[in-house]
Image (cartoon, helix red, strand yellow):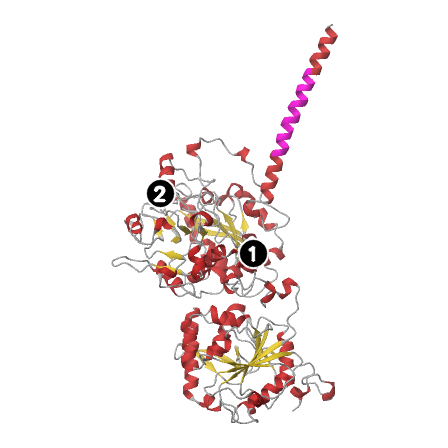
Amino acid sequence: MQAKKRYFIVLSAGSCFALLFYFGGWQFRASRSHGRRGAYSGRNGLHHPSSDHFWPRFPDALRPFVPWDQLENDDSNVHISHRQKLDANSSIYKGKKCRMESCFDFTLCKKNGFKVYVYPQQKGEKIAESYQNILAAIEGSRFYTSDPSQACLYVLSLDTLDRDQLSPQYVHNLRSKVQSLHLWNNGRNHLIFNLYSGTWPDYTEDVGFDIGQAMLAKASISTENFRPNFDVSIPLFSKDHPRTGGERGFLKFNTIPPLRKYMLVFKGKRYLTGIGSDTRNALYHVHNGEDVLLLTTCKHGKDWQKHKDSRCDRDNTEYEKYDYREMLHNATFCLVPRGRRLGSFRFLEALQAACVPVMLSNGWELPFSEVINWNQAAVIGDERLLLQIPSTIRSIHQDKILALRQQTQFLWEAYFSSVEKIVLTTLEIIQDRIFKHISRNSLIWNKHPGGLFILPQYSSFLGDYPYYYANLGLKPPSKFTAVIHAVTPLVSQSQPVLKLLVAAAKSQYCAQIIVLWNCDKPLPAKHRWPATAVPVIVIEGESKVMSSRFLPYDNIVTDAVLSLDEDTVLSTTEVDFAFTVWQSFPERIVGYPARSHFWDNSKERWGYTSKWTNDYSMVLTGAAIYHKYYHYLYTHYLPASLKNMVDQLANCEDILMNFLVSAVTKLPPIKVTQKKQYKETMMGQTSRASRWADPDHFAQRQSCMNTFASWFGYMPLIHSQMRLDPVLFKDQVSILRKKYRDIERL
């Protein structure tokens, strides 16, 4: 009996132990599995850019227990009261569940397209320079309309950028001013820009008035308050940020190895009172004074000495030893920790300097996160794992570092280098949401030339653009369309335009010829045109202006366009050679007549020269090949003011096309060689000889250069000394062994 009892007790204990082990072990395994998934894929599938090392993430079970009304805002150490939370949520996020489908009226856009209206500025209302730049960028864009009935999106003229009540830029009584707007309609189809929200000591995300159903384009927005597919996270930029253009990034060369003097740097404030970053207060643990320089100072504010701690004097001394710009430009990685708010100026500074940002701001919705894959340009860290940062970044391979740095430069120049690009990126993202059937995909947004230069209305197939042939495994087109711009009447069968037409038609790569008749005289009879093996289409320009030569005509059925002036003298051999060169560089202008720009110090403006030298920055469209997408960009991307200037002057259209293509590609055009008689023939007695000799014509082109540079915000033209010649061009061999014989004969 006793034996049976002992046996029963042992059996029961064993069963209980087995059950305990099973359920406890299952939970443990589930916890580990959850943690592993968190490490490998965070929100939106983002992960550490290195393929071998990931930031470990703790499962929710490891978070300390805190009463619900004292929870911190996503580990940001933002201690606010329950009452403050309720006030903040009631004032700014009444429409927290808003999405495009529920809080946006698509019918306005379907009727008139994506047009943006800016409210007229009210008398007595002051607008900060940064907000003026935002409004100017909208008004100068192709989206702008001055007619509210045509608009799909509305932007306030009231300055909403700085909603810190302690700021001198703070606009009072904004609630009543917004509510009185006759088009407000509870914020529906409105976009509100904001850089700073909340104030000392808590710095909440409250903008101080009920935004209703309006979208926010906001800096330092948290993932908790961000409304996906509705709001847009924008970067925090300073008041000195350029309105247009902006400086290029500082990665001048693809340096190998990519490592710089310092591995990791940071220089900034740490906060002794009010909300601040505990991460910044702990940086001294990682700072080693050698290749990891993480410097902070307490010296800010009027009464900082009243609150300074035992480390302030030592930190301030170390802080003064180093120049921030020197550190920035000589570091491989730049730490970007949160400050008072989630965003930081350090973010854009690191991007421009080709210093890979190491993000330490848990819960920050990164700028333009909807379209930009930040894992290709930044390291997304975890504030709770500060001490692991040095070992993590040291483990990233040099090839990956170089790729990260190159991507920082692309993103900086494509979307962040000016206020205009930040604004246009915001608008393009919203437009993609509205017209989903032609929206840009991730490849377009994250690869050169970027989303701003790819207009999806042109085509939804990437193969129709010259930038993606390699990605798609496509070969460049094998045929071109010749477009001859005719401006003088046809009076003789010996005119250069007819010889040019015949020479182009004989090319083995020519699919068709289009003659754009921009002459005031009537069209010649069909029998006046020579017979050719390819179709000849004559289009009579309705307006007969210079810009019409770059219209995206439906008659152009090939991707390649050979643009020709009526007096250009080219042989079939020269046409063939130029086209074969273009097939290797389909995103550029390839051609014969080269020109150059220079900076005139005496006049402090850009100059234009036609001197024949080894240096050039333009290839004129009188004899050049390029992709037909540039016709679409010229027509729909450039502002009417520039095209009207070209049409009024009947000049400079070729310069403007070079500006556009260089701005898109960030590359110079390509000059190809021509026969030696070319220069003398071009300067002969042709229909344009008087134009080239006219000093007013040359002065106009000088003026155009500066007007174009002003609109772009910088000089996009790039100098080059590369000229492509046929194989055996100068070799002393028989002419019969050379492929392009007409070019190579003296």
Task: Report, in whole angstroms, how far the alpha carbon at label 2 lies from the one at label 1.
Answer: 35 Å
Q: Name the side, left or right, on which 7 lies relative to 412.
A: right
Q: Given contact means CB atoms under 8 Å apart, are the residues at marks 2 and 1 in contact? A: no
> Identity of the amino acid at label 1?
Ser
> Identity of the amino acid at label 2?
Ser
Q: Which quadrant: the N terminus?
A: top right
Residue 714 image position (x, y, % from top left) = 44, 69
In the rendered image, residue 27 lying in the magenta stretch gets the answer yes
In the rendered image, residue 250 lying in the magenta stretch gets the answer no
Q: Name the side, left or right, on which 250 lies relative to 139.
A: right
Residue 429 seen in this snapshot: yes
Please, what is the dominant secondary structure of the magenta stretch? helix
Q: Residue 538: name its quadrant.
A: bottom right
Which of the labelled discs sits on residue 91, or is there none?
2
Residue 590 image position (x, y, % from top left) = 58, 77
Which of the labelled discs sits on residue 442, or is there none?
1
Looking at the rendering, the stretch of residues picked out in magenta corresponds to: 12-30
> Please, is residue 132 above or below residue 645 in the view?
above
**Farthest residue in the top direction?**
1
Residue 378 image position (x, y, % from top left) = 54, 53
- 10 Å crowding of disc 1: few (<14), some (14-19), many (20+): some
Per the image, label 2 sits on a secondary structure element best described as helix
> Along the line of sight, which residue is nearer the eye, 623 or 74?
623
Sequence-first disc among 2 and 1: 2
Q: Name the side, left or right, on which 120 lies relative to 361.
A: left
> Along the line of sight, which residue is nearer the eye, 244 or 574?
574
Residue 600 seen in this snapshot: no
**Farthest residue in the left direction?**
124
> Please, is residue 604 above or below residue 35 in the view?
below
